[in-house]
Image (cartoon, coloured by chain):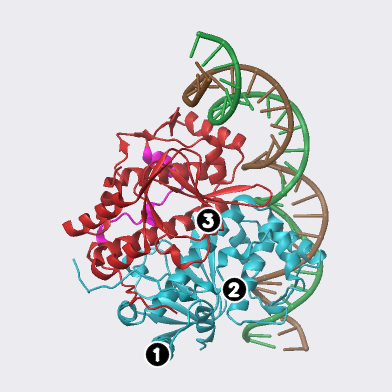
Chain colours: A cyan, B red, C green, D brown
DNA sequence: CGTCTTCAATAACGTATGTTACATTGCACA
DNA sequence: TGTGCAATGTAACATACGTTATTGAAGACG
C-alpha cells in the first residue's frame, strides 16, 4: 500500500537515484499479500523463502518456549524489512505474527541478486537496516537485563516513537498505537499486571497519554530521561550518506 | 595466532576453496594486534574503522548506562568476527572489551571490497556469521525476558559450549572457561550473589563442574533440558552449503 | 614467600515484580 | 442497541531475586 515509509527511512541514510526508486517501487508492488490482525506470517521451523517488506500495519517477531512462555523479540513497523538474506538459513528460529492487519511485499532471492549486481546504494541502505536492527536487538538486551520496569517501558515507547517518526507516521505529538498491554508484556518481559501499573505511573507523571489505540508523547525529552534513552543506537544521523556498503556479488555459484 | 577456529566454523556452513583459504589466511596475519585481559578494544562513541576477527582469547560486547549499570550483550570467542560492515555507521553504540588476553586481526574496508568482488563463498560465510549473531542476540532477549535464573544460566553455558565445540575448542566434556561470576552476572542480568547461588544449584544437580578456569559438562543433554535449550537458533546444520549469499558489490560510488 | 587484590562463598534481610482473582470498560458484531 | 468477548484496571498476597556485609580462597606480584 505504501512504500513511502521505507523510502523515507532509507533516504535518511543513503541518497537513492530515481532508478533505485523505481526498483524498490517495482519490488513492492509485484508480490503483495494481505493478512488479518493476530495471525502468523511465518512460523518457526519453516524454510525461509522470501524477505518480507512491511507495507502497512504492525507485526512482531516472537519466540515461544515449550511451556508457552512467549517473548516478542522485535516489532515491525511500516517500511521495515525482515532479515535481508535469511534464505541462506535452513529454517526459521522464530515466528513472525501480525498485530494489526498487515500488507507485505515478498522480496525474492532473485530480487536481491539483481539489486546486488547493479544498485549499490540500495545494498548500502539494506546493510544500514540490518545493522540498525542488530543494534536495536542489543538495546533490548540492555533493557531486559538492566532497566527497571518503568525505564524499560519508557524506553520501548521512545524507540517506537522515534522509529515511527522516521517513517513519517507521527502527527504532532501523537501516533497510532495498536499494541495491547499483553503485547507490551511479551515485549518487556513483564507481567500484564505490572505493565498496567507501569503505564499508570507513566501517565501519572505526565510522560504519556495512552488511550484507545492512540499514544501521545507530550514531552519526549522527559520520557527519554525517564528511560535513560540514548538514541545513538538507532543511527539516525545522516552523515553516513557518503558510504556504500561492500559485500558482494553472487556470481551465482552453487554447491 | 590461530585462524583454525574461524575456518573450521565457516566450513561447517560453506565449502571454501584453497584460494578462499589463502585470502582469509592473508587477512588474518596482515594487521594483528594484541591486548591484555580486561581492557577495551573499542569504545562506544568511536568511529568504527575496521572489522575485528578474534584470533585467540575471549572478549565481549557491552553497553553501560550513565549510572554504571553494565550489560554484556554478547561474547566473542576465537574465530568470531565483530560486525561485518560496521564501518558504514558513524559511531559505535557499544564497547568491546577483552576478558582474557586477546589477539585480533583488523580487517579493512578494502579487504571486504576485494572479497566482495571475487569470493562469493566467503561472502556467504560472512552472511551466515551475521545472521547467526543476530539469532543469538534474539535468543538472549528470550532468555532475559522469559527464562528463570537457573534456565538462563544453563542456557548461556550450553550456548558457549556449543560454540566452542564448533570452533574446535573443547576437549572431551571440558573446556577453558575464563568468565568470572561477575561477567556471568553482567551477561545474564543477575546479581553476582544470585549467579553464585545459581551455579551452586547447577553443581548440586550434577549439570556442570566449574572450578578454576575450567568448565566441564558431563551431561550436555541434561543441561540443555534444564535450560529449555533448542539449538536451532545457532544454525549449525550443514544443509545450507549449497547456497551463496547475494548482497553485493560496491562499484565504489560515493555520495 | 608473604602481601595484596580479586574472586568465590554464604548469610540476613529487603523489594520489585509475579500471581491469582475479580470488576469494569470498551468495542465488534448480531 | 443489546450482547459477548477482549482489553483494561485494581487489590491482596507470594516469591524470585537484589542488596549489603563479611569471610575465606586463590592467583598476581614484588
Task: Give the letter of the chain under mark 2.
Answer: A
Is residue D7 shown above or below B5? below
- The image shows residue A50 at horizontal and vertical percentages of 36, 75
Instruction: Determine contact: label 3, label 1, CB under 8 Å.
Output: no
Against B245, residue B220 (above or below) is above
Judging by the rendered image, the residue that carries numbered circle 3 is: B141
Q: Which residue occupies the foreground of this view, D11 or B193?
A: B193
In the rendered image, residues at marks 3 and 2 fall on the same chain = no
What chain does badge 3 belong to?
A: B
Q: Nearer the viewer, mark 3 or mark 2?
A: 2
Q: Which residue is rendered at x = 45% and y = 72% of the image? A: A82
CA distance for labels 3 and 1: 39 Å
Q: Is residue A25 positioned above or below B165 on the image?
A: below
Characterize the local packing of mark 3: few (<14), some (14-19) or many (20 or more) Cα atoms within 10 angstroms: many
Residue at 31%, 46% (x, y): give it.
B167
Which quarter of the figure has residue A196?
A: bottom right
Labels 2, 1: front one: 1
Residue B17 is at least partly visible in this image: no
- Nearer to me, A175 or D15: A175
Name the element at disc 2. Answer: helix
Residue at far left of view = B18
- Name the mark on residue A19: 1
Query: How far is disc 3 from disc 2 in space, using C-alphas?
Result: 20 Å
Can you give x and y, in whole percent of width and height, for residue A84 in the image?
A: 40, 71
Residue A172 falls left or right of residue A17? right
Q: Main secondary structure of the magenta part?
A: helix
Which mark is in front, 3 or 1? 1
Which residues lie in the magenta part?
A: B220-239
How much space separates mark 2 and mark 1, taking CA atoms? Answer: 26 Å
Q: Which residue is mark 2?
A: A163
Q: Residues within 10 Å of mark 1 (few under 14, many from 20)?
A: few
Amino acid at each position: 500500500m505504501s512504500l513511502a515509509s521505507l523510502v523515507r527511512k532509507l533516504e535518511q541514510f543513503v541518497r537513492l537515484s530515481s532508478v533505485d526508486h523505481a526498483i524498490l517501487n517495482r519490488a513492492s508492488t509485484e508480490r503483495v499479500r494481505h493478512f488479518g490482525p493476530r495471525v502468523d506470517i511465518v512460523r518457526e521451523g519453516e524454510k525461509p523463502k522470501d524477505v518480507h517488506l512491511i507495507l502497512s500495519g504492525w507485526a512482531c517477531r516472537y519466540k515461544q518456549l515449550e511451556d508457552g512462555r512467549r517473548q516478542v523479540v522485535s516489532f515491525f513497523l511500516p517500511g521495515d524489512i525482515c532479515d535481508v538474506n535469511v534464505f541462506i538459513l535452513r529454517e526459521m528460529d522464530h515466528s513472525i505474527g501480525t498485530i494489526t492487519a498487515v500488507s507485505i511485499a515478498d522480496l525474492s532471492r532473485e530480487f536481491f541478486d539483481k539489486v546486488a549486481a547493479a544498485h549499490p546504494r540500495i545494498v548500502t541502505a539494506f546493510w544500514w537496516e540490518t545493522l540498525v536492527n542488530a543494534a536495536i536487538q542489543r538495546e533490548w538486551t540492555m533493557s531486559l537485563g538492566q532497566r527497571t520496569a518503568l525505564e524499560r517501558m519508557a524506553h520501548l515507547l521512545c524507540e517506537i516513537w522515534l522509529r515511527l517518526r522516521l517513517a513519517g507516521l507521527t502527527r504532532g505529538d501523537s501516533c497510532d498505537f495498536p499494541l495491547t498491554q499483553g503485547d507490551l508484556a511479551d515485549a518487556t518481559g513483564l507481567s500484564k499486571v505490572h505493565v498496567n501499573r507501569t503505564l499508570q505511573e507513566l501517565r501519572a507523571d505526565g510522560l504519556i497519554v495512552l488511550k484507545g489505540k492512540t499514544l501521545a508523547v507530550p514531552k519526549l525529552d522527559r520520557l527519554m530521561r525517564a528511560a535513560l534513552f540514548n538514541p545513538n543506537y538507532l543511527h539516525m544521523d545522516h552523515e553516513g550518506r557518503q558510504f556504500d556498503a561492500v559485500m558482494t556479488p553472487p556470481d551465482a555459484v552453487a554447491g
